[in-house]
Image (tube, rainbow, N blue to C red):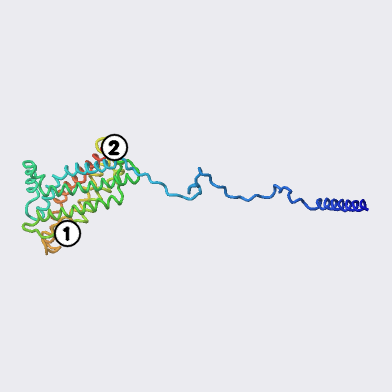
Amino acid sequence: MGEDRFGGLNAEAQGLRSLAQSEAQTIPALNAPISSSIPKPNLPLLLSASSSPPTMAEKGIPTAEKRDWNTSKLGLRVGVDALSASAAGALVAPIITMIDKGIIENASGRNSLGDSLKQSAKELLLRPHRFIGSKPFALIFSLYFGTYFTANTIDTISSTLHSTPPSSTTSGTPKFLATSAANLTLCLYKDNKFTQLFGSAGSSRPVPLPTFALFTIRDCLTIFASFNLPPLLAPRFEKHMSDGVQAYMSSASVAQFVTPAAVQLVSTPLHLLGLDLYNRPGVGLGGLDGRAAKVVRDWGMSAVARICRIVPAFGVGGVVNMKVRKGCMGGLE
């Protein structure tokens, strides 16, 4: 009996084993390897301690370019600007002082233009310390030093911001506006003092606003013709200059002389009308003794005098300022 019992148990065990084997053939094993055809997910990789995040340029994002300013020897360059302006101002101040005084005294009737120039020249030769130390000379020197220094510093600022050579110059709107503002402020102050010093005898009243307005237009024309037109007209002059002429004078120098002088034909009537408004208040515009007639009578002689004045002021002075600045800046480059 016992053997039959054990034999039955063995038979049942063998039956269960055969059943398990048949099911294993139809059901895949749970621990079977995963097929390599299944795509793997793209997981972000952790940055190592030595690596850095990608820059904006690497990501394709546009970035602003880093500006490279030319600040080399900037203090010395500003000193050269002041030195150039001082040399030009000291050179032209004596002759301009004499001419300005003569024009105003002639317009007011206090003295003729010729006699006034003779008296001033005599004082400059015999008593130079008194002439140079006078208020009129100081006013004229300050006017042209300030004008040239402003123009020079605009060129230095431009070369600093745009990283160009220190000796480079500009001729754009910023330079015109800056030099005009400096020249107008100083020139109107000078004209106010000169008109009171050498105008109608015994007259020291304030200069009227219409006179200031005419002087302002006059100076804007002169500044534009002195600082902005020469760089623009120099290439045109060069086309009509022979090689022999260019060996002695550059087209830039010719333009610096010609343009300020030529504009005086237009600005002189404005100057004379402004002076007449101060010297003869209440006089009408028309008539034989009116303002227009007086301007016409004094136009020719005054225009010549102002051309003789403007050639040293913005011709000789402009060339000296340009040459001194270019030479000194070239030594700093």
- Residue under pointer 1: 211
Quadrant for residue 168, please give it: top left
Return the x and y of residue 97 as percentages of the image width and height.
Answer: 13, 47
Asked whether 48 or 97 is in front, the reply is: 48
Return the x and y of residue 246 as percentages of the image width and height.
Answer: 27, 37
Instruction: Point out the image quarter for the C terminus.
Output: top left
Q: Is residue 214 above or below residue 246?
A: below
Left or right, 163 with respect to 256, comes to: right
Asked whether 224 or 263 is in front, the reply is: 224
Return the x and y of residue 282 as percentages of the image width and height.
Answer: 11, 64
Label 1 to label 2, Cα distance in Å?
Answer: 44 Å
Identified by mark 1, the residue type is Thr
Left or right, 227 with respect to 4, comes to: left
The residue lying at 8 percent from left, 41 percent from top is: 125
SS under mark 1? helix
Q: How would you rate the neighbour count of disc 1 (Cα within 10 Å): few for under 14, some for 14-19, many for 20 or more?
A: many
Q: How would you rate the neighbour count of disc 2 (Cα within 10 Å): few for under 14, some for 14-19, many for 20 or more?
A: some
Q: Which mark is residue 142?
A: none
SS under mark 2? helix
Q: Count the marks: how many?
A: 2
Q: Which mark is residue 332?
A: 2
Between disc 1 and disc 2, whose residue precedes? 1
In the displayed orientation, state which residue is furthest to the front.
2
Q: Nearer the viewer, mark 1 or mark 2?
A: 2
Identified by mark 2, the residue type is Leu
Return the x and y of residue 201 as percentages of the image width and height.
Answer: 6, 57
